[in-house]
Amino acid sequence: MKRIALALFACCSIASADERRSGLLDMRPEAQAMQRDDSMNPGMLWVLDGEALWNRKPAPAMQSCADCHGDAAASMRGVAARYPAFDQASGAAFDLSGRIIQCREARQAGPPLARESHDLLALSSFVAHQSRGLPITPPEDTGIRAVRALGQSIYMTRMGQLDLSCGQCHDDHAGRRLAGSSIPQAHPTGYPIYRLEWQALGSLQRRLRGCMVGVRAEPFAYGSPEFIAIEAYLMERARGMEVETPAIRP
Amino acid sequence: MRAARFLASLLLAMAVPAMALADAAMVAGDAVAQSLTGSAGDPLRGRAIIIDRQKGFCLLCHSGPFNEEPLQGNLAPSLEGAGSRWNEGQLRLRLMDNKRVNAESIMPAYHRIEGLNRVGPVWRNRPILNAAEIEDVLAFLMGLKTENAP
């Protein structure tokens, strides 16, 4: 009897458990409209730049992304929904931007793309845009599982002078007000995002650095295994939610 | 001259952890009865620290009787009536290190430097508020009495 009651309870809590919501829904209507209308969404400027870069042939290899990958609408569809991914050859996980950096160096022999540079953000947003509307579907291999577990442990670790973990705000107090702003659930559904506070497009890692500086912690480096691990965990946490790139956020 | 200044800053840097350790020894039960400075704080300075978004940043999480501050948080109880809920020694400890009273608390320890993780270089080895600032905030909060308190 007790067991049945427990099972029932488990069922009910699963049924009502998916209270996940994209930060899109917490914005005022004008900002939501801005994201939904491509002619108003400033993130589309980066996507369009990314499309141009996709077709450009950088010296010295004179090889464009399109020369290998063809039409991004077909070849890149769903890719961002699966990243970060574990790379067997190098034994490390790559986030989407990291994969583009690696491809640029290895295949195009082109000038390296710096993290948070315009060109890398443009290419990343162009590639991620090809997955817009698709559900986030992280891979299930053992390599990425280990990375994800590391990400979860970092997410749960208190840090900084303020001694707060990501989870204490974004799990335990999501929806509450931190000064004037509502604390989001922190689902990385639309990166790179155009953040109104930045007046620019930026990566998830830039956003994570903002939170780390906010709790007065020393941020992880761009491209570090720690940031990629957190992203892998957050993407698993957002499994099934729709890719929105390029999203608008306050 | 330069050496003297270096020595002075070194001594100052060493003095901070020593002070924090001394504070820990002052805890009795759930309170720190004695003033950290040996004298009473200034409630007006305390009020300024509370609303300062870089200094005390209390209103990120708490609300309170600060009509000129429109953006107040709701992650934690209102500061209204704090001076009726606790006596001075209890509130002093809660400001210094609330996790001693409640390990699950999200409130930062305002006057502890040990046991923290990955603190940014600018903030390392210094408490959020120094002893005098703790006493100032305490003096203001003790004045926030619930009306018609029993």
Image (spheres, coloured by chain):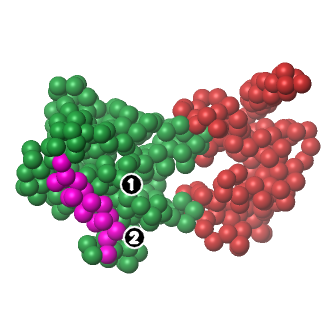
Chain colours: A green, B red
Residue A202 is labelled as 1
Quadrant in the rendering for residue A20: bottom left
Q: CA distance from mark 2 to mark 1?
A: 18 Å
Tell me if mark 2 has few (under 14), some (14-19) or many (20+) residues whose alpha carbon lies within 10 angstroms of its own. some
What label sits on residue B24 in the rendered view?
none
Q: Chain of mark 2?
A: A
Q: Position of residue A73 (x, y in %)?
A: 11, 58
- Residue depicted at x 31% and y 48%: A120
Residue B145 locus on image (x, y percent):
78, 62
Q: Identity of the amino acid at label 2?
A: Met
On the rendered structure, is A162 left or right of A61?
Answer: right
Q: Secondary structure at mark 1?
A: strand
For the residues carrying marks 2 and 1, which lies nearer the camera in this image?
1
The amino acid pointed to by label 1 is Gly
Identify the residue shown where x is 68% and y is 65%. B64
Taking the image as drawn, is residue A34 in sight? yes
* Residue occupied by mark 2: A27
Magenta segment: A40-57
Q: Which element is circle 2 on?
A: loop
Q: Given the image, what chain letter belongs to the residue carrying mark 1?
A: A
